[in-house]
Amino acid sequence: MPESSASEVSGRPVWQRSRTSTRVYMLAYLAILSFIGGLFIAQPLIFVSVPLTVFLGFTVLRSQDPRADLEVRRTTERVRIREGESTRVRLRVRNIGPRPVAMLQVRDRVHPELRGKSTRSGFSSSLEAGETKDFFYEVHANSFGVHTLGPIALQVQDSTGLFESESELRSYSKLVVFPETTERLGHVAIRPRRTKSWPGEIVATRAGTGMDYFNIRRFAPGDPVKRINWRASARHTQESDEFLVNEYIAEVGAEVLIVVDAGRSSGAGRDRNLLVEYSVKAAISIAERLLHDRNRVGLLTTGENPRRIASGYGKRQFDKIALSLLQLEPGESDIEWWVERSLHMFFPHISQIIFVSPLTDANSNAAAAELVRDGDRDVIVVSPNPIALSKPRSGRADAREWRIALRLAQMERAIDMDRLRSANALVVDWTTPASLEEVMEVHKRALSKYSALLARHR
């Protein structure tokens, strides 16, 4: 996960026109009722209306416009956290006007997915002229995604509490919540067959800038002196005056495209959201590993908000990919059309494709088959298993029929995956609610065979 830092936004509220509080009308109604009761029911009730009337008159004479000149600043301690983590938020309110504020109420609206047991985002206080006060509260990440804090609702009252004014400061802060189980795939090596010219972690069968010894050749102008093999040169100088330098195996990078299917092929209801959640976790982990190995990585997503991110490398590219994935929502989008339209037009130099999809219908399988048929690219399919990850509870009235339907669905899925494997695609079947690291460990042997097969053709 990229390092997080504090985020700060500020603004000055624009107040509505001051209005009379409902308490004034209640006191006036009580005074009138007491006076009328004293005239017709019991005369002593008239004396009850006298202090109420005096208090109302004194309040009206003393009343001032409660609107104040305030500056509100929100500071978020961390803008990137993981599921289950918490972070603090500070609201700093400063009275930059010449008059004090008798009563100030501040309430910061918090996204429901950021509310925890100790989340208290409403505060009340008074402010003297020129005074600054800080209010703190804590938010808790319940689910991953890009959530917002704000707007900030403010209300001020005069010293009597009978006149008030309100404002809504449209100040927003984004909080990025990463999935809890995303981690660097430390034990999984993803090695595309076709590499590019920039340095990376993929070992190529040619000389270049690397760490492992490859060959010895004659010294050429421009070669660094530290590469001279002095022992070999000493033996060689008996026949010639030329020096010999060491050559190393080239370690280069590749260009990889991650395709995430969140379209109409991703199930329905809660199961669809669960499958998209697994897909997002897998894509973030894979992107982090590929970028760590100095590959160029692009992204293509489908769903409610389909996106394309051009290939790039480095920390900024990971931030772009992660933010796009965290905002991914399932929806009506044709994965086959997106792949056919975008692959050759926007990603023509891709060496490897990581296709993340539950493969639940003909569109997803057709898109996967289209990717595999193109022999110039290596294809790895990571598929959250919709059958294994969304099994219903037992004890249903139609349990027998359900078992038959489940068995048929499993057979159909096995046939589709065998077709992809027969076309030299590596298929990772995600059948347990474990992290991708653990799932890849199960498929480690198949991944090693796949890498060896590609190495023989490299």
Image (tube, rainbow, N blue to C red):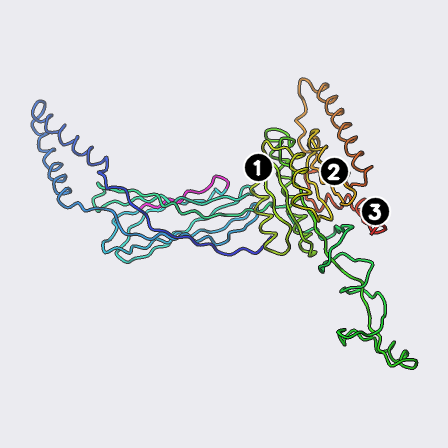
Image coordinates of residue 369 in percent, x first then y, are: 75, 35
Instruction: Say whether residue 57 is left or right of residue 369.
Output: left
Q: Are marks 2 and 3 in contact (CB under 8 Å)?
A: no
Question: Label 3: few (<14), some or many (≥20) within 10 Å?
Answer: few
Neighbours of disc 2 within 10 Å: few (<14), some (14-19), many (20+): some
Dot 1 or dot 3: first in sequence order is 1
**Mark 1 element type:** loop
Instruction: Identify the image quadrant of residue 35.
Output: top left
Q: Which residue is mark 2?
A: 429
Mark 2 or 3, nearer chain start: 2
Sequence order check: which comes first, mark 2 or mark 1? 1
Q: Nearer the viewer, mark 2 or mark 1?
A: 1
164 lies left or right of 148: left
Membership of 268 in magenta stretch: no
Q: Is residue 372 above or below residue 90?
A: above
Compared across the picture, whether 54 is left or right of 128 comes to left
Amino acid type at circle 3 is Lys
Expressed as whole percent of the image width and height from the top left, the position of residue 73 reads: 38, 53
Residue ID for mark 1? 329
Rendering coords of residue 139 (x, y %):
48, 46
Nearer the observer: mark 2 or 3; the answer is: 3
Q: Which residue is mark 3?
A: 449
Q: Amino acid at mark 1?
A: Glu
